[in-house]
Image (tube, rainbow, N blue to C red):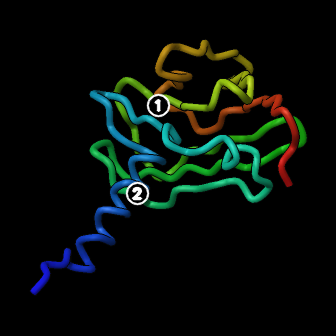
Amino acid sequence: GSVAMPHGWAIAEVHLLLRDCLAYEDGGRLVLFAGAPPTWFTHRTGMGIRNLPTQFGNLGASWERTDDGATLRLDGGAAPPEGFVLSVPKSLKPVVSVAGRTIENTQRGFVLPADTKQALIQLTPKEDIQ
């Protein structure tokens, strides 16, 4: 006969793949949305993570669309010692600020302080996807 991968295992693999798209640990940092496609950032319903266990505590993150971009809210208690890295596709020309300060876009993304609760993101997508 044939050997099939157990159904539960396949679901676990997909779950881990999705998890890595939305959040993964990188040393003392927690990287957010690195695997999310550009359309997820501009979709009117936004995206969210609820009670995701990480090495740094449970992560809660919501990406809510606004007229000129989005608001990222972080809750759930995750406190990575080196902060969060917000990954937004360069094609959306993101400008990120926390508490009125513009965050520099590094090679890896926007490094947000560990105590960040909210970040404002301005986006200039080619066309607004409804």
**Residue sitting at 32 percent across and 42 percent down?**
56
Residue closest to the eye, 83 or 109? 109
The image quarter in which residue 48 lies: bottom right
Residue closest to the eye, 128 or 118? 128
Asked if residue 44 lies left or right of residue 72, the reply is right
**Residue sitting at 73 percent across and 49 percent down?**
64
Label 1 sits on a secondary structure element that is: strand
**Spatial CA span between label 1 and label 2:** 14 Å
Q: Which mark is residue 84?
A: 1
- For residue 120, above or below residue 20: above
- Count the marks: how many? 2
- At which x and y percent is residue 6? 20, 78
Could you tell me the amino acid type at mark 2? Leu
Asked if residue 15 lies left or right of residue 42, the reply is left
Q: Which mark is residue 52?
A: 2
Residue closest to the eye, 62 or 47? 47
Q: Residues within 10 Å of mark 1 (few under 14, many from 20)?
A: many
Label 2 sits on a secondary structure element that is: strand
The image quarter in which residue 16 lies: bottom left
Asked if residue 68 lies left or right of residue 37, the reply is right
- At which x and y percent is residue 53? 34, 55
